[in-house]
Amino acid sequence: GNSVTQMEGPVTLSEEAFLTINCTYTATGYPSLFWYVQYPGEGLQLLLKATKADDKGSNKGFEATYRKETTSFHLEKGSVQVSDSAVYFCALSALRAQKLVFGQGTRLTINP
Amino acid sequence: EAQVTQNPRYLITVTGKKLTVTCSQNMNHEYMSWYRQDPGLGLRQIYYSMNVEVTDKGDVPEGYKVSRKEKRNFPLILESPSPNQTSLYFCASSRDRDALNEQFFGPGTRLTVL
């Protein structure tokens, strides 16, 4: 079946550090890939998405590239801020699927 | 403002006492879904609905019921809650079931079953 694996958290970084959160997936066909962010006490918000191989999704300084050859969709940001502290979820949606399949989430804490 | 609302946000109850968590969206979305979030497991789908009067099981439906009598509402019903249903619950909606569409999430309901 379809599945998503994220790097174990929590991740703690200093402000302005470079961020990578790894995400790999297993799926049949060509799924769409997403990163969602959950700020404390809130629901999930779509951060970025990519719908086909080699697409790059980007938003708020975050980027992720759909790599079919490595079945990966790693999240990156060049210089993190304290306000980026949140839980990040990688997810996929297969064609004609009725749901999102989520990774386990990675808690990110940015210290000033 | 486009949003998904859930009530209550927090609930502590006891085993066996029936409860309902409401979910409502104001975006005229066809597709609605319930997830539960547990540490180390991410979000898992409980039930989903592709339109009014059309509901189906997700990955973890045991112990839950849903209904979709109106397009905007999708309540989650726990007929006889048990402690293993202690979790954080999210309702979500999207325009339709197309994989490309963004799902909008509610703020969550934290449920504790004693």
Image: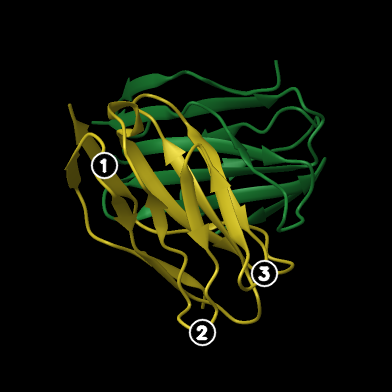
Chain colours: A yellow, B green
| Callout 3 and callout 1 share a chain | yes
| CB contact under 8 Å: marks 3 and 2 | no
> Of helix, strand and loop, which one carries label 2?
loop
Between A5 and A78, the one lying in front of the other is: A78
| Amino acid type at mark 2 | Glu
Q: Quadrant of the C terminus of chain B?
A: top left
Question: How dense is the environment of label 2, judged by Cα within 10 Å: few (below 14), some, or many (20 and up)?
Answer: few
Residue B71 has which mark? none
Residue A69 has which mark? 2
**Relative image position of residue B30 (x, y in whole percent):** 80, 41
- Vertically, is A102 above or below A37? below
Q: Is residue B7 left or right of residue A107?
A: right
| CB contact under 8 Å: marks 2 and 1 | no
**Residue topped by disc 1:** A108
**Residue topped by disc 3:** A52
Q: Is residue B24 visible?
A: yes
Query: N-terminal of the two: label 3 or label 2?
Result: 3
Who's the residue at 34% across and 26% down the image? A83
Question: How dense is the environment of label 3, judged by Cα within 10 Å: few (below 14), some, or many (20 and up)?
Answer: some
Mark 1 belongs to chain: A
| Amino acid type at mark 1 | Leu
- Vertically, is A37 above or below B40? above
Who's the residue at 82% across and 40% down the image? B52
Mark 3 belongs to chain: A
| Callout 2 and callout 1 share a chain | yes
Query: N-terminal of the two: label 2 or label 1?
Result: 2
Query: N-terminal of the two: label 3 or label 1?
Result: 3
**Relative image position of residue A100 (x, y in whole percent):** 57, 56
Mark 2 belongs to chain: A
Between B80 and B44, the one lying in front of the other is: B44
> Of helix, strand and loop, which one carries label 1?
strand
